[in-house]
Image (tube, grey):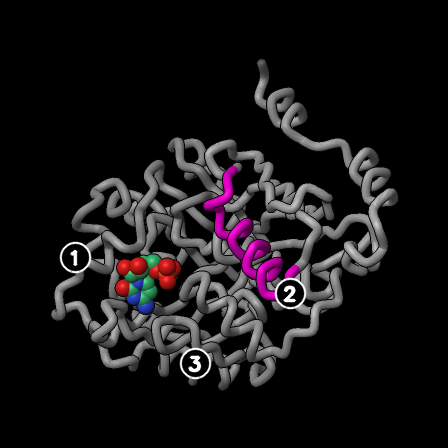
Amino acid sequence: MGYCARFMGMMLDKSAISMHNARMGHAQRVQTSGSVCFARAYAKINLTLDVLGRRADGYHALATVMQTVDLHDTLCLTATDDNRVQVVCTRPELSNEDNLAARAAQLLRERFALQQGILIELYKRIPIAAGLGGGSSDAAAVLLAMRQWWQLSLSPSELQEIAASLGSDVPFFLTGGLALCEGRGEQVTPLAASLTNCPSSMRWVLLLKPAIGIATASVFSGLPASDYTDGSYSRAVISALQAGSLPQPGDFHNSLERSVLERYPEVAQAKVDLLQAGSPIVGLSGSGPTLYALFSELSCASQAQERLQAQGYEMYLSHVIYPNQGDIRVL
Ligand code: C5P
């Protein structure tokens, strides 16, 4: 059976669900403002990642400047009457209840004692285990979509707390755009509003995804103290951006990069190839393996993409994005 046929076979019939819901008692049903809710979940890159040290709880203290890009997953939420959360994903290995998006939905169902179940259809475009925050972004999108669609009473700080309980990166995706993230990553200071505009040299973001997946925990656990930094790279990047100028290439620093390049020679080779393709700024996103390159001109980014694709690399051409209203659509 083809991939598409398998996926279609797993989808529930939405009209059957809504007919069934119509027969349920009104008191049992949450008040949705439409029959389905679509949401976009954007990927991120880390412009910097300063690891400041190891904390007593085993996490690492960070200062990281994160930026969302327009590469995104699409989620479709449907209320069901089977009292459970189900995920159907274009990547079958993610079609299960451990998916962070499912856990986000389950947390809100428990908190609000919601009797209705929820079906999450997840069209995955963001590569997984890639350092692009796809799973965290999907979870944040579910929280935002359910709050809006089911009109749940949740303050920004309550939402932030729930997001942080799901993962260190999840709170960032509640606001997205450009932000400084501190603590273990969950303390988010949005920066986009303080910028006059994004430096033109950072408009286009070319992503190179080496053909491996990396577990974040394994990179952090092997990190020597000699790779810790004092937060100065993040401060330098923020100052430059706030002054409307492009940060120095050396300030796009990631404390995890040295050990990732050492452990995974294919990522080190990919970095060499990406630099040769013409961008002055190349960085590792999160714990990798995805590398990003920043370009001012679409034509240069596109030429580099073609060249690297011809070398066999998985490439995505994207641009920075400052999400706001409109990423959630109730139909
Ligand atoms: O918070 P999250 O579950 O996404 O983190 C995954 C793993 O990455 C953690 O279990 C931890 O090993 C590591 N991590 C860390 N310090 C951070 C964030 C993550 O050591 N600030």
- 127 to 161, vertically: above or below: above
Residue identifier under label 3? 238
State how far apart marks 1 and 2 are (Cα): 40 Å
How far from the left and from the top, in percent, is residue 79?
A: 73, 48
Ligand 1 within 8 angstroms of badge 2 C-beta: no
Q: Is residue 151 visible?
A: yes
Which residue of the protein is positioned furthest toward the top in this rendering?
1
Q: Quadrant of residue 232?
A: bottom left
In percent of the image, x 52 and y 81: which residue is there?
A: 244
Q: Secondary structure at mark 2?
A: loop
State how far apart marks 1 and 3 are (Cα): 28 Å
Q: Is residue 286 visible?
A: no
Looking at the rendered structure, the number of numbered marks drawn on it comes to 3
Instruction: Tell me the crowding category of disc 2: few under 14, some 14 to 19, or many 20 or more residues within 10 angstroms, Cα based.
Output: few
Q: Nearer the viewer, mark 3 or mark 2?
A: 2
How far from the left and from the top, in percent, is residue 231?
A: 29, 80
- 216 to 303, vertically: above or below: below
Query: Which label belongs to residue 64?
Result: none
In percent of the image, x 78 and y 48: which residue is there?
A: 36
First to last magenta residue range: 96-113
The mark nearer the N terminus, 3 or 2, is: 2
Is 54 magenta? The answer is no
The mark nearer the N terminus, 1 or 3, is: 1
In percent of the image, x 17 and y 61: which residue is there?
A: 223
Residue identifier under label 1? 222
| Prevailing secondary structure of the magenta residues | helix
Query: Which label belongs to residue 112?
Result: 2
How far from the left and from the top, in percent, is residue 173?
A: 54, 65
The mark nearer the N terminus, 1 or 2, is: 2
- Tag 2: amino acid: Phe
- Tag 1: amino acid: Gly
Instruction: Tell me the crowding category of disc 1: few under 14, some 14 to 19, or many 20 or more residues within 10 angstroms, Cα based.
Output: few
